[in-house]
Image (spheres, helix red, strand yellow):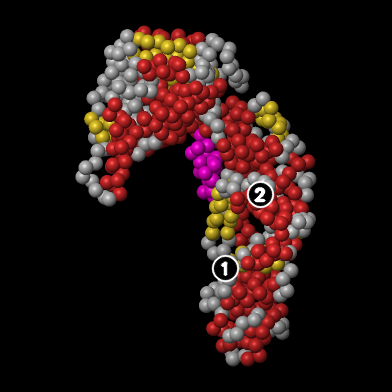
Amino acid sequence: MVHSLADSSLFHGRLGTTLRNLGAISTREPFRNRKIIQELMMGSHNWVIFPEGLMVKNKAIYHRGRYSLDNPEHKGPPHTGAAVLALKAEIIKRLYLQACNRNDIKGMQYYESRYNFGNRDELSFKDIVVVPVNISYYPVRPNQNFFISLARLFQPNLSKRAEEELCVEGGILLSKTDIHIRFDQHINLSSYLDNALPLANTFLPFLSEEKRSDLIINIQRNRLTHRFMNRIYRSVTVNIDHIFSSLIRYSKKKNWKEEDLKAAIYIIARRASLLDDVRLHDSLGPALLRLVSDHLYPPYESIKELASSQEVLTFRDSFIEIKDWNVMNTFQFHGIRMKNLPSVFANEIEPLRRLIALIRKVSAMKHPLLSREVSHILKQQDERIFKDEWQRSDSKSRSRYEYGAPLLLKQRRKKIGVVLCHGYLAAPQECRALADALHDIGCSVYLVRLGGHGTSPENLRTVTLDDWVDSFDRAYGILQSGCKKVIVGGFSAGGLMALLAAANKQNYVHGVFSINAALKLVDLRSKLAPGITAWNQLLDRWDIEFGKFEYIQNESENPEVNYERNYLNGVKVLEKLSDRCRSRLSHVVAPALMIQADQDPVVHPDSGKNIYEAISSDSKELEMMSFNRHNIIRSEDTEVLKRVQSFVLKVMNSSRHSQEVY
């Protein structure tokens, strides 16, 4: 069992008994330090000790490049108790063993009696080392919980301090909390003692062993403390709460537009991922894309709600008003986490100097620069993902690079942007004629490449629906960052992606169009895909290759763009997309256009009608067109291209959802 210290005020009644049973020892325990030294020398217990000597609730441990504390219990350099105990235990162990080697019976008995052990055989043969450990929690949200109720049963007059600690720490234990524990490289004490002890013995023989030891400890304890504190606090796992809070702290603006705050968080997270001394939590991982693609992102909503509830910020009409941070920091040490938890989050990452410099820089950026930077990051990321996937593909089966690559057709005046998505088994080039037609009327157009497409059909074996959603959201974020209005549209499976985006983003999307959206397929064999995939997985489990069904041949209308093999996992993902889109259609509220070929051999002609009836848009149109093929967006299909142009121009000239652009 690992032993640790706990505040003496907690050791009353049954609560105290419970803490002792868990390995905690009161800070006022008689001969406490001797007990710690004894257990370290014997190796009977490891000890966990706060590096500063106490729990620093406000996390204010770093000021102007130095570690120091500023709280009611201690102001100035951090306590060095942990370093002193480690050094003292190692020194006493060495002195005792030297006494044994000299057969110094009196010296041996002194140490055995003082530290309560029998003989040298009871001591551990291992060195005593200091292991810097960082424990990062996410999320930290104070709440009334079971531990508080239980403690009040044992001790009705619970102190405010104990109640606060149970409210926060209990909330961590009883909630879905990520606990990241990082063990850094251990610090061997030899470098602090091997030279110092012989020097002291040589030049200070007139001092007793105990005084020489104390002198060495006094010299080395600050060095050792700074070393392990530096390792501990620079190993923090940085989460979205940290970035959000530090942005607010270092902002010179009293008001933020919320979209700018989101953009700043995204930029910092992506740049910080390139820093070798910063470790990022999953809340700042790939899913952070939702923050800049007008998609609900729960981790952001959570810290936003906390900041609002503690009145650190005020949110009004997409603007954020920042309260005076200095005023908010006046709360008492033991109440800061209940009153201004964001300040604690900001303090926690102060030792990460490169990250703080980045946050300061981004906090000063204005709207146009933030928007351009987000668009640039997303575009680079989209291109890199495609390039990596294309290069990993089989050269014999992969698509032409220029056909598969995502493509941005820019306009100087960014009045409106169109996110345009290709169909299943295809590539961005499939929609090029429609993209050119929209570019001709003044639109910036981004041709999406769905994950697994435009490279090699084998990449469909591992693709997921989340990969497709991320692909679409990156494209949306690229245009949303600079355009007044964004319309989403697509062909076949791309039409479903556009409808799903319109449902998820609702009023942020200014229009949506779908062409032969694959809501209901004519080929019923697709229904077999989940069962066949499960069969393949069963054979994989038994390491059996014979009998697998991985793909079927695909007869394409456009073999230059479409894959010749249709992997069953891809069909399964397409079915998931169809099901999810169908369940979300009622959330589509933007002006909508559905174009459906009346004799489509791939998508059932009822799909257009079903979509039209399910969506909630006040302005919606269904255009049934006479075609006996699926792909109706070629350059020669002028009727379709002009119809989409007409719809986009109508949205472009509409004042609905108009937004200010800086």
- Viewer-nearest residue: 344 or 505: 505
Answer whether residue 276 is magenta in the image.
yes
Pointer 1 residue: 1
Q: Which mark is residue 145?
A: 2
Asked if residue 221 can be seen in this view, the reply is no
Split into 4 quadrants, where in the image is the N terminus?
Answer: bottom right
Left/right of residue 208 with respect to residue 513 in the rendered view: right
Q: Which of the two discs, 1 and 2, sits closer to the camera?
A: 2
Asked if residue 10 can be seen in this view, the reply is yes
Q: Residue at x 54, y 42 (%)?
A: 283
First in sequence: mark 1 vs mark 2: 1
Q: Is residue 271 above or below residue 29?
A: above
Rounded to the nearest angstrom, the CA distance separating label 1 from label 2 is 27 Å
Q: Residue at x 65, y 41 (%)?
A: 246
Q: Position of residue 356 (x, y in %)?
A: 62, 44
Q: Amino acid at mark 1?
A: Met
Mark 1 lies on a secondary structure that is: loop
Split into 4 quadrants, where in the image is the C terminus?
Answer: top right
- Viewer-nearest residue: 391 or 587: 587
The residues colored magenta run: 269-289
Answer whether residue 535 is magenta in the image.
no
**Outermost residue toward the left in this view:** 546
Mark 2 lies on a secondary structure that is: loop
Q: Position of residue 248 (x, y in %)?
A: 67, 38
Q: Amino acid at mark 2?
A: Asn
Q: Residue at x 59, y 33 (%)?
A: 262
- Viewer-nearest residue: 539 or 242: 539
Left/right of residue 143 with respect to residue 629 in the rendered view: right
